[in-house]
Image (tube, rainbow, N blue to C red):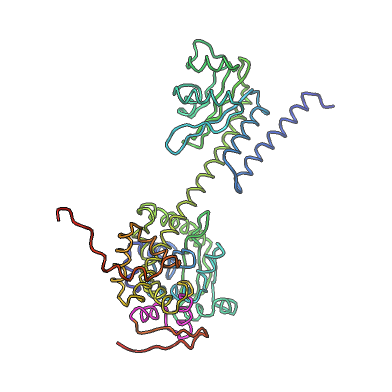
Amino acid sequence: MATDADLRAQTRQALTATTFLQIVDTLVGDFDVIDVLTGLTSRCIELLGAAAAGILLVDATGHLRVIGASTEQIELLELFQIQNDDGPCLDCFRSGRVVIDDNMGMTSRWPGFAVESIRVGYPSVCAVPLRLKDLTIGCLNLFMSEPVALSEGDVALAQALADVATIAIIQDQATRDAVVREGQLQHALTSRIAIEQAKGMIAERAGVDMDAAFLRLRTYARHHNLGLTDVAESLVAGRLQVGALSNVRRIPPPPQPGR
Amino acid sequence: MAREVAQSRTSRLCTACVDVLAVSGAGITLMGGDQAGPICVSDSGIAALEDLQFTMGEGPCRDAFSTGRSVHAPRFDDVTLARWPSFVDLARTSGIGAVFAYPLKSPGSNIGVLTLYQHDAGGLTDAQHDDSVAIAEVLTETVLSLQDAAPPGALAGALDEAVAYRAQIHQASGMVAIQLEIPVADALVRIRGHAFATGVPIGKVAGDIVARRLRLGDDRSGPSDRDITHGN
């Protein structure tokens, strides 16, 4: 016969498995990083003995930002650490290691943070890095309402959840970067082709050769303060008539200083 | 044209593919929408085969690009002949017996194709296939890295060959668009149609249009616009 403890263990096991599956699911298909991380903070509270949780993530400029927090108070606590450049989450992010203080007091390593955390009801804190190999991209912070430490098992589970979330985030960023780079390549390629096509259009309309056509294209672009590719693409798309470039030869050169 | 390509800064990429994969020839083509251009080919025979695929809009390169999967034609049989009639015809007369195409895959879309040519019929070994997949990945990263270094909006100098190689085709498209008062994309279709109908390579047709030796007629019925005037 199953005892209450057995049932609780089974429920927790099922919830843990579901949480992993949900995070892994995000690896295949479109997902929002913020959604994933906000979901992760809620799951940490359900699964672990934490009363609240928050997540910090490093941005492109190397600064930490609050990405998810289970309560408004936690968001303020996280911001407090970033602003004061001091606290368990920053230590965790910099070292890439788990940082634990289960009974913050006056002797705490972070006296300023300890006072704030205790004031809002969290005397115990555990910060887990979001880390893949040597790369730490942020940290997951767990706050407890009693001055007791999380069990070793809970810390290990928190780290496992953080690891899976990290892979999801890195995968997402790699995909975004690739799509942006690819778009830049495609745009540069089609722009370059448009210039050749526009040269042909101008050459035909004005009865000049390709070099003269290019000169007209460039003169028109400069005179109208437009990019060469903008003018070329407008011509090819029919937004600009070739006739508009037929008289550009008569445009005088820009005045020289001192004349 | 092949001469220009062989001297391009990216030409060593093709040489490396031929050496590493132990194949007879290779071509690397960049694709931008419907437009394509090789950034390098290993020899002029390959250039003609890559050119033909662009002219006809058929061939293993096109298929690999549109499907995002590698295309394997270890021998030219009735099936491949039905699939790419013009390509197989030219490949046979060029002494090519097998062809394989690998897309340069990127998460959003494919950016080009690596095409491998063999003189003799026969499939690639498993090792050659695995290496080709790996090399296609490296080439994708190489091309994207080259472009990363370019000024915003401009095409990287090393990749410019993809356009410069076919510059006259694009210029001719612009001219025909004005002559026939049709969109540039349609003008390219007309030039391709003319090249197909006359059996003249598209590069030659474009060169004649740019030199004003050839003017495509306004007759929409097709091959009757063969009013070649051998002036100059």
Frontmost residue, B95 versus B111: B111
Check the image and report above or below for A28 versus B92. above
> At 51% across and 85% down in the image, what residue appears?
B222
Q: How many marks?
A: 0
Check the image and report above or below for B164 versus B230. above
Q: Is residue B55 magenta?
A: no
- Please, which residue is most extreme toward the left here? A258
The reply, left or right, for residue A176 in relation to residue A19 is: left
Q: Position of residue A70 (x, y in %)?
A: 61, 28
Q: Position of residue A120 (x, y in %)?
A: 58, 17
> At 45% across and 24% down in the image, what residue appears?
A83
Q: Position of residue B178 (x, y in %)?
A: 41, 76
Frontmost residue, A238 versus B101: A238
Q: Position of residue A240 (x, y in %)?
A: 41, 66
Looking at the figure, which quarter contains the C terminus of chain A? bottom left
Looking at the figure, which quarter contains the N terminus of chain A? top right
The reply, left or right, for residue A84 in relation to residue A70 is: left
The reply, left or right, for residue A22 in relation to residue A84 is: right
Kindly report the secondary structure that dominates the magenta region of the rendered protein. Answer: helix
The reply, left or right, for residue B224 in relation to residue A228 is: right
Check the image and report above or below for A257 versus B193. above
**Image: magenta residue range:** B187-211
Frontmost residue, A115 versus A222: A222
Q: Is residue B188 magenta?
A: yes
- Please, which residue is most extreme toward the right here? A1
Examine the image and state in which quarter residue B77 appears. bottom right
Examine the image and state in which quarter residue A53 appears. top right
Examine the image and state in which quarter residue A144 appears. top right
